Amino acid sequence: MNDVEKWLEAIEITPSDADIRALVAVVAQALLDRKMMMASAESCSGGWIGKAATDLAGSSNWYEGGVVSYSNAVKQKLLNVSSESLERFGAVSREVVAQMADGVLNCIPVNLSVAVSGIAGPGGGTADKPVGLVWFGWSSDFGQGMTLCCQFSGDRDTIRRFSVYKAYQGLLELLLQV
């Protein structure tokens, strides 16, 4: 395993600010090495993916921007998420995050995108979609994309920290395929 691949290992403890910064720096370098740009579409993370990017000096060389689409109306209007998918599957679903990732990729001219939608709590969970359930979607202009569902535990801050960390892990995973 090389130094970059170690960042794809599962993390068992809540990612600290330093953990997130370190992973973002690895993703940033991978994007720079490939002369690529990324964008984000965020719901439950509320802009934290974008914040983590812009906390790093020089982020304008690899992070173009993002959409915080907390409401379904914003998901539909800015990211072209279909009302049918929202009604049938709900905002926290594979179908919706895939459309969010594609939508931000089409809205902001970049090579790679990440989308996150989940239930950070403390309320809002159901038997089918409990607090801590988070869906991720990644899309690219080079034909690679994926979705992933994770069940995190902890308070709202912890769930959001894990979400940001996992979002960047997925970006790195796609970048290693290029």
Image (cartoon, helix red, strand yellow):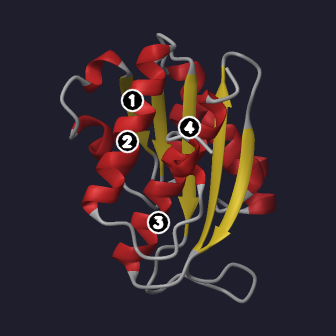
**Image point (23%, 35%), residue name:** 56
Q: Secondary structure at mark 3?
A: helix
Q: Which residue is mark 4?
A: 172
Decide: is 127 above or below 160: below
Q: Nearer the viewer, residue 21 or 55?
A: 21
- Amino acid under label 4? Leu
Report, in whole angstroms, how far the alpha carbon at label 1 lies from the one at label 2.
6 Å
The answer to which of 162 and 68 lies nearer the viewer is 162
Nearer to us: label 3 or label 1: 1
Q: Residue at x 53, y 83 (%)?
A: 153
Q: Going by the picture, which residue comes out furthest to the top?
A: 35
- Quadrant of the image for the C terminus? top right
Q: Which mark is residue 24?
A: 2
Which marked residue is nearer to the observer: mark 3 or mark 4?
A: 4
Residue 28 disc label: 1
Horizontal side, residue 70 vs residue 171: left or right: left
Q: Tell me the CA gap for discs 4 and 2.
A: 9 Å
Q: Is residue 63 visible?
A: yes
How packed is label 4: few (under 14 Cα within 10 Å), some, or many (20 or more)?
many
Direction from residue 48 to residue 153 in the image, left or right: right
Instruction: Give the amino acid at mark 1.
Output: Ala
- Tell me if mark 1 has few (under 14), some (14-19) or many (20+) residues whose alpha carbon lies within 10 angstroms of its own: many
Q: Position of residue 105 (x, y in %)?
A: 58, 24
Mark 2: secondary structure: helix
The earlier-in-sequence mark between 4 and 2 is 2
What amino acid is at disc 2?
Val
Q: Is label 1 in contact with label 2 (beta carbons under 8 Å)?
A: yes
Q: Amino acid at mark 3?
A: Phe
Residue at point 27%, 26% (across, down)? 59
Q: Quadrant of residue 86 in the image?
A: bottom right
